[in-house]
Image (cartoon, coloured by chain):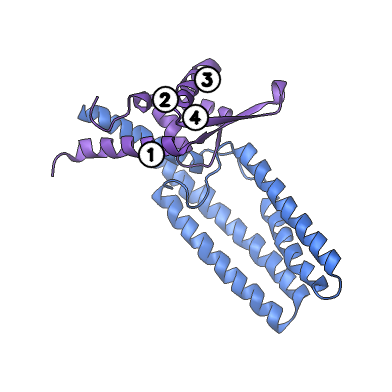
Chain colours: A purple, B blue
Amino acid sequence: MIRGLDPVIHAPKRLAAMAVLANAPTASFRFLKEFLEVSDSDLSKHMSALEAAGYVSATKDGRGRGATTTYKLTRTGQTAYNAHRDALRALLDGPL
Amino acid sequence: MESDAQEQLRLIERAEAAPYVDYPKTPWWYPVVIGLWAAAMIGTFVWWRENAPLFTSVLVGLLLLEAAFITWMQRRHGAMPMPGRGRPPAEIGGIWRRYFAGLAVIAVAVGLVWWLVGVPAAAGTAFVLVTGGLVVYERAYAVAAAAKVKERLA
């Protein structure tokens, strides 16, 4: 792995989820699922990995069928996302 | 590795733009309701000196209504962007700058009417300018800018 690139975020679906969360205060499970075009279980797995890394936090409102889960980028997640983004740019820009 | 990086940056650009361009259609009544809310906020000041409890309770009620409305919008949208957070696509950034400039113009116009004519006229002016301004903004945002972003990133 290139220096600065984060192995947790490198997976495309996780990277896209982080990019969405970096541009909105919160994102709902449904929004992420529809944007990423993944199944419920697939999204749950990706978001759990990001939660385990401390990059996102989840909030659940309500119970049963009407329950909604929203995700938020943590400060650690924001820093990791910015570093990953910058590393990708640097990789393309090459040495000065 | 470079093509992988390019691919990831394209993915990032599409995902960063998503909260700004992937959203349910704004209901037709939205500009009118916000216009009425703005007029009510200004109109409340009729009671500013005459009836302090009435003034305060209506003002608090309107603020609670606004908070409830924003919560509903956020749930409906799923990932509602906020000014000052993230990186809006250039097309949207331009629209937002004009939106805030428009808000300042409306505030000055309403203040001027208030000063010259009075609170009821200022409330009416706020209704007309806010409703009209939002209709123009919605067209510029949803019909023009968001469509351009979607086309560019397709």
Q: Which disc is residue A35 wearing? A: 4
Who's the residue at 48% across and 36% down the image? A73
Q: Position of residue B18 (x, y in %)?
A: 47, 38
Give the mark nearest the N terminus, 1 or 4.
4
Disc 2 vs disc 4: which is toward the camera?
2
Q: Of the residues shown, which amino acid type is indicated by label 4?
A: Phe
Q: Nearer the viewer, residue B86 or A54?
A: A54
**Residue picked out by circle 3:** A44
Residue A59's label in the rendered image is none
Callout 2 crowding tier (Cα within 10 Å): few <14, some 14–19, many ≥20? many
- What numbered label is drawn on residue A79? 1
Q: Residue at x 56, y 68 (%)?
A: B104
Badge 3 element: helix
- Name the N-terminal-most of marks 2 and 1: 2
Secondary structure beneath dot 2 equals: helix
Tag 2: amino acid: Lys
Front disc: 3 or 1: 1
Amino acid type indicated by mark 3? Ser
**The quarter of the displayed image where residue B51 is located:** bottom right
